[in-house]
Image (spheres, rainbow, N blue to C red):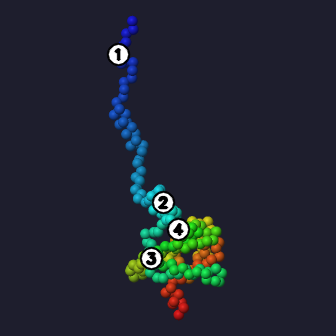
């Protein structure tokens, strides 16, 4: 006859689950120094794509906080060779996107060496302190190349990609390998020069 014993001595005693947790917690605090992560409230993923979408196209550029409409009247005179082929008034909004994609470009560039979204003419209000300690603000034109393959040129010099470059009265801008030249003139300055 077999006798079944209820003796627990053959089995290992179960460990207390709280004891095990305490050991794990103390090990984690010794080994792991938590890294503080600052919150990032910028748009990302689908929300960013929705925000930067215009006419069904995701726009590569978003305007900076210092974007402003210009106070003066600026114009782009478009030349092909010696002949003026167009005049563009570029003072009615704070930014103009230039590129081949007519769905999003404010100023279309039809040359095949240009990107769909090639560059942006952006007006920015910047403050500076003069020698007398007074703060002056001015709205000035800038151009930014949108990381294109064939580049953007100001006065025959290729500008660095994704960086604002200040433009001045009578600067000549070219895009990619296009032979068209865009001459930026401020109306008030042009009138002074004509006198």
Is the residue marked by circle 1 packed among few (<14), some (14-19), or many (20+) residues within 10 Å?
A: few
Name the residue that disc number 3 marks.
69
Q: Residue at x 55, y 71 (%)?
A: 98
Q: Whole-percent x and y of residue 40?
A: 42, 57
For numbered disc 4, what is the local secondary structure? Answer: loop
Foreground disc of the pair 1, 2: 2
Q: Residue at x 40, y 39 (%)?
A: 27
Q: Sequence order check: which comes first, mark 3 or mark 4?
A: 3
For numbered disc 3, what is the local secondary structure? Answer: loop
Foreground disc of the pair 3, 1: 3
Q: Between marks 4 and 2, how big is the CA–CA gap?
A: 14 Å
Contact between labelled residues 3 and 2, with CB atoms less than 8 Å apart: no
Q: Residue at x 49, y 87 (%)?
A: 188
Name the residue that disc number 1 marks.
6
Q: Whole-percent x and y of residue 160?
A: 57, 69
Name the residue that disc number 4 marks.
104
């Amino acid at each position: 006859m077999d006798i079944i014993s209820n003796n627990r001595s053959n089995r290992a005693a179960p460990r207390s689950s709280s004891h095990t947790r305490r050991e794990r917690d103390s090990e984690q605090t010794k080994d792991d120094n938590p890294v503080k992560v600052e919150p990032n409230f910028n748009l990302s993923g689908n929300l960013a794509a929705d925000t930067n979408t215009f006419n069904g196209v995701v726009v590569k550029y978003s305007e900076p906080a210092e974007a402003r409409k210009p106070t003066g009247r600026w114009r782009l005179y478009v030349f092909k060779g010696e002949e003026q082929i167009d005049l563009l008034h570029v003072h009615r909004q704070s930014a103009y996107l230039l590129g081949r994609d007519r769905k999003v470009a404010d100023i279309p560039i039809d040359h095949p060496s240009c990107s769909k979204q090639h560059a942006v003419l952006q007006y920015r209000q910047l403050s500076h302190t003069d020698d007398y300690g007074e703060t002056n603000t001015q709205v000035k034109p800038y151009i930014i190349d949108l990381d294109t393959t064939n580049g953007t040129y100001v006065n025959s010099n290729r500008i660095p990609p994704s960086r604002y470059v200040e433009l001045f009265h009578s600067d000549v801008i070219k895009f990619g390998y296009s032979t068209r030249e865009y001459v930026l003139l401020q109306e008030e300055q042009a009138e002074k020069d004509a006198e």
